[in-house]
Amino acid sequence: MGDGARRDRLEKLLGPVVAADGFDLEDVTVTPAGKRRLVRVVVDRDGGVSLDDVAEVSLSISKELDAADPLGSAPYVLEVTSPGVDRPLTEPRHWRRATGRLVKAELKDGTSAEGRVTGADDSGVELDGTRRLGFEELVRGRVQVEFSRAADLDDDADDGLDDLGDDDIDDEG
């Protein structure tokens, strides 16, 4: 069985199992890993995926793989994970889950657009609250990694030194 056929078969097998646990099946890959195969299943859902979620859906996936035996007699290692920040945004649900994030979008006309996702629905995405892009205009998007600048840090992270008065300082130290 070719890799594409195996992937399709696993997606059809695992899609309903993952959905029953409340997740979206984002990807399934099978790669050789020595004498075994690595079966990597990527799941996601609105609100994100916790470690407890991964453990729950891993158990369901493992039971289904053992029962259906789609990989034959070869041993395998199962890895269930959530998508990384570098996952391309290609589906409406990906864009919806990126609300509030800075993204760079590739457009079908060869240009790109960058902005913060302020909304997304089944027909398109809104960037910076001012620009609407329909999904028919988009190729894909990527979340941009943002690093906080010192000037942007919240002043609530106070070290308490500003509140010291003259009476609070011990000169005998």
Image (cartoon, rainbow, N blue to C red):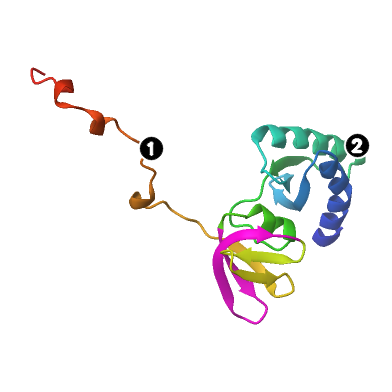
Amino acid residing under circle 2: Ala
Q: Which residue corresponds to the image point at 80% horizontal and 41% vertical from the top-left? A: 22
Location of residue 86 in the rendering, given as x and y in whole percent from the top left corner? 59, 57
Give the vertical position of 165 relative to 96 (above or below): above
Q: Image check: 70 left or right of 169?
A: right
Q: Which residue corresponds to the image point at 9% horizontal and 21% vertical from the top-left? A: 171
| Majority secondary structure of magenta residues | strand
Q: Which residue is mark 2?
A: 67
Front position among marks 1 and 2: 1
Amino acid residing under circle 1: Asp
Label 1 to label 2: alpha-carbon separation: 53 Å
Q: Which residue is mark 1?
A: 156
Near-viewer residue (56 or 116): 116
Q: Quadrant of residue 68?
A: top right
Which stretch did the figure color magenta? 102-121
Q: Image check: 38 left or right of 61?
A: left
Near-viewer residue (56 or 145): 145
120 falls in the magenta region:
yes
Location of residue 119 in the rendering, given as x and y in whole percent from the top left corner? 65, 59
Q: Which residue corresponds to the image point at 65% horizontal and 50% vertical from the top-left? A: 83
Visible in this render: residue 71? no
Q: Which residue corresponds to the image point at 77% horizontal and 37% vertical from the top-left? A: 57
Q: Residue furthest bottom?
A: 109
Earlier in the chain: of badge 1 and badge 2, it is 2
**Mark 2, secondary structure of its residue:** helix
Q: Image check: 35 left or right of 65?
A: left
User: Which numbered disc covers residue 58?
Assistant: none
Give the vertical position of 54 relative to 39 (above or below): above
Location of residue 125 in the rendering, given as x and y in whole percent from the top left corner? 67, 65
Task: Sort mark 1 into few (<14), some (14-19) or many (20+) by Cα contacts within 10 Å.
Answer: few
